[in-house]
Amino acid sequence: MFRSGSTRVGLTAVSNLSRASASVQAQAPRLPLPPVSPQTSFARPSTLISSRSPFSTRFVRTISSTSTRAAAPPDSSDASSSSSSSNSSNLNSSFYFSSNGTHPRRPTAPDWHSMAEQEISKYLCQTHDRVFDCNRAWAAEQTAKDPNFFKHLAEGQNPEYLWIGCSDSRIPAEQITGLQAGDAFVHRNIANLVCNTDLNVMSVITYAVQHLQVKHIVVCGHYGCGGVKAAMTPKDMGLLNPWLRNIRDVYRLHEKELDSIADEDARYNRLVELNVLEQCRNVIKTASVQQSYAENKFPIVHGWVFGFHDGLLKDLKFDHQKVLKDIQKVYNLTG
Ligand code: CO
């Protein structure tokens, strides 16, 4: 799948996503969305007032509960569980299987501050072992469908796509697009940023373009991005400051447009989109992308945004050719 030309990719992805979204919803942990409230949402950086962590309520609770044992329990993430407030009884029955009996499901998150150390250790063992149980189930499933699956996989990779997405646990690239192993070379970081001083992402782009010769580079953000929200919160985030500063720069670049949006949620969503588009521009600024495109007419850069409310991807219709032409007035590296 996804072997079509660039103009069909967005539609194909949405089509595949429609089929995949039901299973994603069934499997994905139900983490709370980063809160968008008048206190924590952004207007402009200088006008923000917040005393809460901008990432998410879950983040705050987890840190608090492990350090003081006085905070509320983590959210229950499984609709099948009866309650998040029980502890040892949940542990005894939490490691159960999905309805078809093949995939171990996530144990119910217990109430940390009422648990004995032994119970916490048991829970950690279960959540660790679950990954290996899932891996065995997945490997068996692939072999059942195609006995030569792993033989082919071991022969090498020839992905069509480089996916640059957010590290957010709710947006697994392959699952939301229906892509299979071998289809996409994947890089993820907080808020899907492409910084020219980040050796990691620059190496990934160079390798994907020069050696794998990917045909598409997708920058995929998502509405409700905690990284974007954190960047727009007037708070010292320590080591995260320089990373998140890139998003504040995106706001400054589009300050006029963003400030004209009265609704805070709408302004937040637009910043998510503008951040994706700026990262697409950053991809095009690289020598490997410019030189490959001049020689081969690929890769093409795309900007997409994932929405939690419907599980669909939105194609921002990033105009690769126009942006490349504009950018090369200043950033031309093809000489
Ligand atoms: Co994010």
Image (cartoon, rainbow, N blue to C red):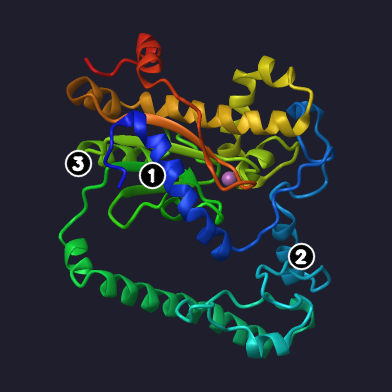
Task: Tell me the residue that label 1 is attached to.
Answer: 200
- Splitting the image into four quadrants, where does ligand 1 fall? top right
Q: Is residue 44 left or right of residue 203?
A: right
Secondary element type, mark 3: helix
Q: Kindly indicate the quadrant of the structure image that contains residue 296.
A: top left
- Near mark 3 (Cα within 10 A), the count class, few <14, some 14-19 or many ≥20, is few
Task: Tell me the residue that label 3 is attached to.
Answer: 211
Q: Is residue 331 above or below residue 280?
A: above
Mark closer to the chain start, 2 or 3: 2
The alpha-carbon separation of the residues under discs 1 and 2 comes to: 32 Å
Q: Is residue 319 left or right of residue 2?
A: right
Q: Is residue 265 above or below residue 142?
A: above
Question: Which quadrant of the figure contains the C terminus?
Answer: top left
**Which residue: 75% across, 75% down?**
84
- Amino acid beneath label 2: Ser
Residue 53 position within the rendered picture, expressed as x and y whole percent measured from the top left: 75, 50
